[in-house]
Image (cartoon, coloured by chain):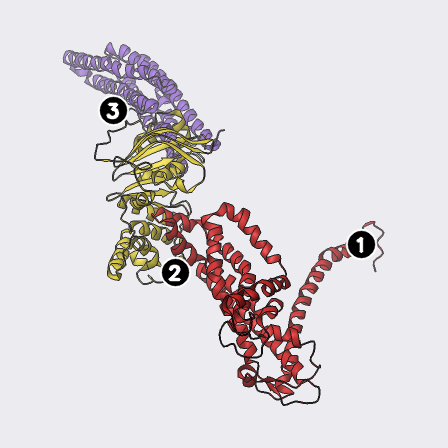
Chain colours: A yellow, B red, C purple
Amino acid sequence: MTDIHAKEQTNIKFTVESLNLFYGDFQALNDINLTIEKNEITALIGPSGCGKSTFLKTLNRMNDLEPNVTINGNIYLDSVDVNKDMDAIELRKRVSMVFQQPNPFPKSVYDNVAYGPRINGIRKKTQLDEIVERSLKQAAIWDEVKDRLHKSALGLSGGQQQRLCIARTLALEPEVILMDEPTSALDPISTMKIEDLASELKKNYTIVIVTHNMQQASRISDKTAFFLLGNLVEFDTTITLFSQPSDKRTEEYITGRFG
Amino acid sequence: MSTHKTGTLPSAKQSAFQKFKNEYFWRYLIITCGLFIILLTLGIGFFLVVKGSGTFTEFHHSVWEFLFSSDWSPMDSTTESGGGVGAAIYIFGSISTCTLALLFVAPFSITSAILMTEIAPNSGTKIFQPAIEIFVGIPSVVYGWIGLTVLVPFIKHLFHPKMGGYSVLAASIVLAVMIFPTITTVAADAIRSVSSDYRKAAYGMGSTRWQVIYKVIIPAATPGILTGVILGLARAFGEALAVAMVIGKTRAFPANILSPTNNLTAAIASDMGNSATGGEQNMALWTMALLLFIISIFFIFLIHIISGKEKKKHA
Amino acid sequence: MSTRIQYMKELEKLNHDVLEMSTEITEAIEVMSLALESCDTKLSMQLIEGDDVIDHMERSIEKYCIDLVVKEAPIASDWRRIASIMRIVSDLERIADHCSDIAGYVLKLSKGKPVIPPFQFGEMIQIMKSMVTDTITSFITLDIPMALDVVERDEFVDQLFTAAMDEICDKVKESPLDIDQYASYILINKYIERMADHAVNVAKWIPYIASGEYKI
């Protein structure tokens, strides 16, 4: 297990200290401590119900939208506490999220990508055009949609829709992109495209990805965290965790002895 | 017929009959019921067309006169003809009261729907929803009665109109109250059925709650909301009793919203029983009924187009 | 709750096959030792013919490992074991090859004039035999100290190898006409030393299987 770095170190993006989360009386996260580094892909793995998605959602306070959630502990984004010293709306513009089911709005491709900039007050068409093009290019989908920008986004295939959702978050120029099982609902080729995209994006963004697919975690992530029943069992570089895990439970999970 | 002596033959025959009974009996029964309904609907339509076109075929009036002339003076006897069958006043009465009702109620309905589903969903389901459902159950005559005894005097007291409180305004308000629950429930359902995926996506990008509502949810729910509006409009168009009690039943174009007038449904309701069967007035009233029927079909058609467009978008 | 039952059976089979091969190897070394001692042609022929069986075992285990990786995508300790086994069976097969090579030279020696072998051979073969047995044991029990001890013992074999070479050279200088026989002994000397080296190669994988320690 890595040590918790001092908050002043500049390569750390998130520092999580003693995080506990309760849904009513049920404890979903138990004393989580870890750090997420900049420009890396950190994967969160673990069996269903282990708390990895819940943990992901604490990073952009999406848990606030659910009733009866209590959080103790601290989460620092660049040394600022996200719960106590930051506005949730502002936080989510810096830490955006891509979901398991591709969920483009029932609007045109253009309007989907322009949504973020528009709610931030950008109105000029030339500016929006530029942002839309840049985001779609970054998401490696520009060539496929440039001739149908004003047609409904719902006409795209599942894999394309997911890349569109990624483009949508990129339009906000976030610092962190959270991905909650982004390829679970997609075919293998689309999955590969999105994995390639993530590996490319990490040069400019910090990425945290929840995945059920261990090969995916080992392929693209730099660090991996293994969650079990709300506890962080092991957190290490990916190659170490997958070739010589220190905890027996990690070994048993990743080799499929239980799941 | 074969003469096998095995024990199987009689029971085989019996089970074939059983099979027929079980499979085909119910199937044909259901088909018959379905066909009956379709035939009934077609029958009503056909009946109205036959009856309603009598004005044009038997009494040789033009459609133009019926729709645009305000001279309503049909002969109420089986022998005479040559009176005026201009239903323009009634048509205008229906259109104006329904449009005004819609203008009054739509903002309230949509905001109530938003309140119920997004702002206060808990009290929405526990208090608001049952309250609205009670509204729906109140009979039209009660609405009419309250309109008559409370609203009309109130208008009279407030505005001192020349003709008393019976007016387009009164009718519009009564209609607005009556169609409010229809539009609100349909709009609320439409909003509720907007996939939570869109909400998640919008919040995930740092939208405020209002941005999520007016930029994502309402646009996505628009087809459903429009459906609710049209259903409300259809109901308003078809409402007879409550309107008749407060509209004033005056055969004249209203000078302003405080003037009384008349509309299609009130006219049919009050005059149909009195008119001589087969006479010109009677025929003309049937034509009004046919017009109402056509307008209802038009509304249903509109709703189908809107939902069809929505289905195409999501396909 | 246990999952991947089929996979676990496959891993067990793999272990079993490696043990079977190891048994064959230790037997072959025993036979080779006897054949060399008594210059026995029958035992030598037996060894040469039996080498095919061991070659076949090695290829079959290799293929099994490759198929297992494709099918089951093993990771962590499963992967370390499979990756190591692929290397280990290669070294084991070489040990068996060398037994057969030595048997070939025993046959050659039997055709010529009997000559006294270097006296170091006895001890070299003893140490080498114990190294092979211990390395196989440490593979089964994942006994890291035992494996490391095998690595250390190689030094003795190397020293005995050098001493045996010196003795052979002295003997050749004394009786140059026996060069044919002594040439065979030179090669036998080398093979014994190589067998010890292969045992060391196998031993080096044991810490990796046990704890992931991979020394470059």
Residue marked by disc 2:
A152
* Residue C207, image x, y percentages: 31, 21
Q: Nearer the viewer, mark 3 or mark 2?
A: 2
User: Foreground: A69 or C87?
Assistant: A69
Q: Residues within 10 Å of mark 1 (few under 14, many from 20)?
A: few
Name the image quarter holding residue B170.
Answer: bottom right
Asked which secondary structure carries label 1, the reply is helix
Asked which secondary structure carries label 2, the reply is loop
| Quarter in which the N terminus of chain B is drawn | bottom right
Identity of the residue furthest to the left in this view: C173
Q: Gap in Å between the C-alphas at discs 3 and 2?
A: 57 Å
Seen in the image, is A143 located left or right of residue C159? right
Q: Are marks 3 and 2 in contact (CB under 8 Å)?
A: no
* Residue C198, image x, y percentages: 28, 22
Give the residue type that dot 3 points to.
Lys
Q: Chain of mark 1?
A: B
Q: Residues within 10 Å of mark 3 (few under 14, many from 20)?
A: few
Q: Is residue B93 above or below residue A123?
A: below
Asked which secondary structure carries label 3, the reply is loop
Q: Chain of mark 3?
A: C
Residue marked by disc 1:
B14
Seen in the image, is B151 located left or right of residue A128? right
Q: Chain of mark 2?
A: A
Give the residue type that dot 1 points to.
Gln
Give the residue type that dot 2 points to.
Ser
User: Foreground: C41 or A198?
Assistant: A198
Q: Are marks 1 and 3 in contact (CB under 8 Å)?
A: no
Residue marked by disc 3:
C215
Q: Gap in Å between the C-alphas at discs 1 and 3?
A: 85 Å
Name the image quarter holding residue B291.
Answer: bottom right
